[in-house]
Image (cartoon, helix red, strand yellow):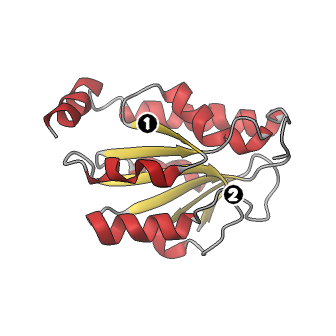
Amino acid sequence: MIRGPAVRDAVADWLRAPTLILGVGNLLRGDDGVGPLVCARVNRPEAVDCGDAPERYLGVAGEDWVGRVLLVDAVDFGGEAGDLVFCTSDELVERFGTTHDSGLALLSRFLEKEYGTPTALLGVQPGDTSFGAQVSAAVQAAVDEMSSWLTAAMSQRKPREVEAAWTRS
């Protein structure tokens, strides 16, 4: 598990392969909306807002163009609100402290077993995930930072290439 400033380098390295980003979260639960917020900011076809049901989008990971998957979610790893963590699937614990029905470790193992797709997590420590809460300033700053990294790293690939791959399937 990588925390702190080294997260940016780990994410950049992960994104060297064609990567599907699955943004997980619920916008109605304050800081839990991290994944959808990042996908909206990145605004590319390979960044998919899964809402709070990522299991509904797992088939997308089987597309020919996908080399890796990056789950983006709010996860409780004991940090301060807005802190970032990056970990590969073998470092995920069964219930990493998410508000979703399917644990991230279970999703990751499925993707790797079913499609042979390496999977990692870019997580943000949430503050308030209660229903009706607003996104905290610390988590919004993390969303802005992550979105900038992801957009820069993904700008090397053309969105039309991804769209074309999806329409051929």
77 over 59 or under it: above or below: below
Q: Do the residues labelled 2 and 1 touch (CB within 8 Å)?
A: no
Residue 59 left/right relative to 143: left
Query: Residue 156 placed where, x, y %?
Result: 30, 32
Where does the image place residue 5, in percent across and percent down from the top left?
63, 51
Instruction: Say what amino acid the circle numbered 2 marks.
Output: Val
The residue that label 1 is drawn on is 47
Q: Where is residue 78 in the image (x, y as percent from the top left)?
A: 79, 65
Mark 1, secondary structure of its residue: strand
Examine the image and state in which quarter residue 168 appears: top left
- What is the quadrant of the C terminus in the image? top left
> Could you tell me which residue is drawn at 79 percent across and 60 percent down?
79
Q: Which mark is residue 82?
A: none
Circle nearer the N terminus (2, 1): 1
Q: Is residue 137 above or below residue 104?
A: above
Give the residue type at disc 1.
Ala
Residue shown at 69%/57% (left/top)? 75
In terms of depth relative to the viewer, which is nearer, 165 or 132? Answer: 132
Relative to 48, is 100 above or below? below
Q: Residues within 10 Å of mark 2 (few under 14, many from 20)?
A: many
Q: Which residue is drawn at 35% across and 46% down?
A: 19
Mark 1 surroundings within 10 Å by alpha-carbon count, few (fewer than 14), some (14 through 19), many (20 or more):
many
Number of numbered labels in the structure image: 2
Residue 84 position, x and y percent, is 66, 52
Gap between marks 2 and 1, in whole Å? 19 Å
The numbered mark at residue 75 is 2
Please name the residue shown 54% across and 74% down the image.
Answer: 91
Of the 4 image quadrants, the one containing the N terminus is bottom right
